[in-house]
Amino acid sequence: MTRFFRFTSLLLALGALVAFAGPKLKKTAIGQNITLGVPEGFAALPDDGIAAKYPAARKPLAVFSNPSGRIDLSVAQKPTTFSNRDYALLLKIYKASIQNMYSKVQFLQEDIRTVNKRDYVALEFVSTVTDNRRGGNLAPVRKYQFVQYAIEGNQLYVFTFVAPAEEQAQWQPTAQAVMGSVTMK
């Protein structure tokens, strides 16, 4: 009987360790200077897929999506006149910009944090866009987002994880692990 309880205790301990092991990420190089963990099962979008999903003059460096295409992880780069000494100001600017972009924003995290010996501006939030058109009757669109910014030289790098708000509980640990895996040389 004692052996049975020992075995059961060992199984419970092993189960707890597996449950808290965290999301599985694959270390992936983005260009020559960036690596980040991409969630298992996510695939890189080809250039035409990026252009269709993110129509902009400056396309992201990389976009990864889950098999359903509902969850995205992107890395973008653009010129900036700010330096990495301006992070406190950038935090205020990007927070205000995000608040102006959406009907409603609930911030879960807004700070300057250090990841792998580098500082980042981090904004984690749930955004809501409501249909304010006259006679509009579309349901509000809610998204969970984690955005992390870094400046290297005269370039701003933006790391973004986006999921439907109703899947936040499922994807938030993955988003946090991805953002914690970013390495810039």
Image (cartoon, rainbow, N blue to C red):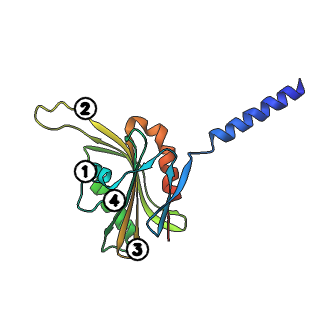
Residue in the image at 13% along x and 37% along y: 133
Q: CA distance from mark 4 to mark 3?
A: 24 Å
Evaluate if marks 2 and 1 touch, with contact meaning CB atoms under 8 Å apart. Answer: no
Q: Label 1 amino acid? A: Met
Mark 2 or mark 4: which comes first in sequence? 4
Q: Indicate which disc, 1 or 4, sits on the residue closer to the N terminus.
A: 4
- Compared with 139, 99 (above or below) is below
Which residue is the site of mark 3?
Answer: 85
Task: Quote the CA–CA distance across marks 2 and 3.
Answer: 41 Å
Image location (x, y in percent) of residue 152: 41, 72
Regarding mark 3 in the picture, which secondary structure is present there? helix
Q: Which residue is mark 2?
A: 139
Mark carried by residue 138: none
Q: Which residue is mark 4?
A: 60
Judging by the rendered image, the residue that carries numbered circle 1 is 101
What residue is rendered at 44% in x and 48% in y? 43
Front position among marks 2 and 3: 2
Amino acid carrying label 2: it is: Ala
Is 8 located above or below residue 27 in the figure? Answer: above
Characterize the local packing of mark 2: few (<14), some (14-19) or many (20 or more) Cα atoms within 10 angstroms: few
**How far, Cα to Cα, is label 2 from label 1?**
17 Å
Instruction: Tell me: 47 left or right of 116.
Output: left
The amino acid on which the numbered mark 4 sits, given as a three-letter code, is Pro
Q: The residue tagged with tag 4: helix, strand or loop? A: loop
Label 3 vs 1, first from the N-terminus = 3
